[in-house]
Image (spheres, rainbow, N blue to C red):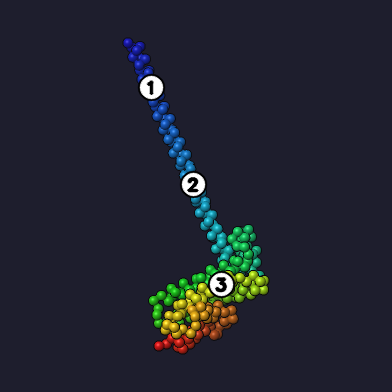
Amino acid sequence: MVSGQGVNFRAHWQKADANDILAAARAGRRVVNVALESRAGNRNRKARVVRLSREESQARTRARLLESAHEVVAREGYENASIDLIAENAGYSKGAFYSNFNSKEEIFLELLETHAAKDVPEISVLLDGVDDPYEMIEIISTWAASRSRDPSWGVLALELLRRARLDKTFTPRHAKLFQAQWAGLGRILLKMFPEGQAPASAEVLGALVFEITYGAASAFTKRPGVGTLVKVALTALYLAHGKR
């Protein structure tokens, strides 16, 4: 009787051990699966982070090269602003330059396009809520005087376009470099005149202001100042064609 109970006792624990082992094995598989899924998820997350970091890194590199191009051309002039100097000044290799731009001409075209695209939004903010033509003229002429303090932009445009003509690389991209900028400001200036009474198209009015602002000669002289020239031009146009 005792022996039979002993056998049953052992059998009971053997069965219990087997159940525990089976449960542990199942739990282990779940743990392994969770671990594998977690590792896979981590790899995917890391891959996404790497891709984002690479894109952000390339964007930063491109922005720094553009910034460096402006620094170098302001110091050396367009003819002497070599790819080597631009890359070195930015802290990158020539390989990094060519990973972002095909040529010296391309980086300077993009630099001018980027700069030109900022002007009209900036002026629009300054003129927000302003309807009086005289006040508009004052704000725009003050902006022009401030912008003209850095003559490198006007000089760069002249030198780049001149070189493109000489090298026969002048394209529609060169020809349209400032058209959107001119037209954008011109549409603002049209508000100074009665409908249909403006002395010129939006593009011509905008070009007038920007060509005075970035004109290479006037940027290097103290008098007459760029702000004065812009104010005289716009005031004369308003008195002749806009004043009611």
Q: Is residue 225 visible?
A: yes
Residue found at x 57% / y 67%? 110
Spot occupied by residue 67 in the image (x, y as percentages of width and height): 56, 66
Foreground pick, 94 / 237: 237
Q: Earlier in the sequence, mark 2 or mark 3?
A: 2
Residue found at x 61% / y 70%? 171
Q: Quadrant of residue 106?
A: bottom right
Q: Is residue 209 left or right of residue 134?
A: right
Foreground pick, 204 / 100: 204
Q: Amino acid at mark 2?
A: Asn
Spot occupied by residue 118 in the image (x, y as percentages of width and height): 50, 71
Q: Amino acid at mark 3?
A: Leu
* Residue identifier under label 2: 44
* Residue identifier under label 3: 177
Residue found at x 49% / y 86%? 232
Q: Quadrant of residue 4?
A: top left
Q: CA distance from mark 2 to mark 3?
A: 43 Å
Q: How dense is the environment of label 2, judged by Cα within 10 Å: few (below 14), some, or many (20 and up)?
A: few
Spot occupied by residue 217 in the image (x, y as percentages of width and height): 59, 81
Give the secondary structure at mark 1. helix
Marks 2/1 in contact by CB < 8 Å: the verdict is: no
Q: Amino acid at mark 1?
A: Lys
Q: Is residue 220 visible?
A: no
Establish if 166 lies above or below 243. above
Quadrant where the N terminus is found in the figure: top left
Q: CA distance from mark 2 to mark 1?
A: 43 Å
Quadrant where the C terminus is found in the figure: bottom left
* Residue identifier under label 1: 15
